[in-house]
Amino acid sequence: MQFDDFPERLQVGLLAFTKAVESDPEVWIPLLACLAARPEARALVCDIASALSDFYCNCTAEAAILFMSKLLHEQKI
């Protein structure tokens, strides 16, 4: 499975979804509320979060270590 353009595709999809919700919130907000009540929707959100964490796990760990290192080096003890 190729994930080379995954972040760009995710960003474009989220922007399109946001634009749709902003264009007609009277329709989308009740629809999303009904969808959020379904266990299938919660499972889908968990699957998406899991896929994102798998995709970004190395980047996130490296960024966290670099951030902590920078904080430790900047401290004047």
Image (spheres, rainbow, N blue to C red):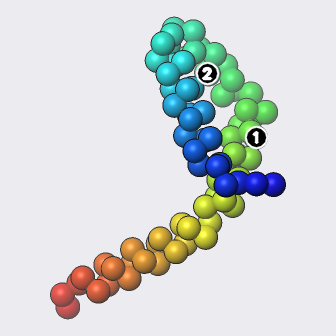
First-in-chain label (1 vs 2): 2
Q: Amino acid at mark 1?
A: Ala
Snapshot quadrant of residue 75: bottom left
* Residue under label 2: 33
Quadrant (top left/top right/bottom left/bottom right) for the N terminus: bottom right
Measured as percent of width and height from the top left, residue 46 is found at: 70, 46
Q: Amino acid at mark 2?
A: Ala
Q: Residue at x 39, y 74 (%)?
A: 67
Count residues near mark 1 (Cα–Cα under 10 Å), then give few for <14, some for 14-19, many for 20+: few
Snapshot quadrant of residue 42: top right
Q: Residue at x 74, y 39 (%)?
A: 44
Image: 21 above or below 40: above
SS class, disc 2: helix
Quadrant (top left/top right/bottom left/bottom right) for the C terminus: bottom left
* Residue under label 1: 43
Instruction: Give the farthest residue toward the bottom.
Output: 77
**Residue at mark 1 to residue at mark 2: CA–CA distance:** 15 Å
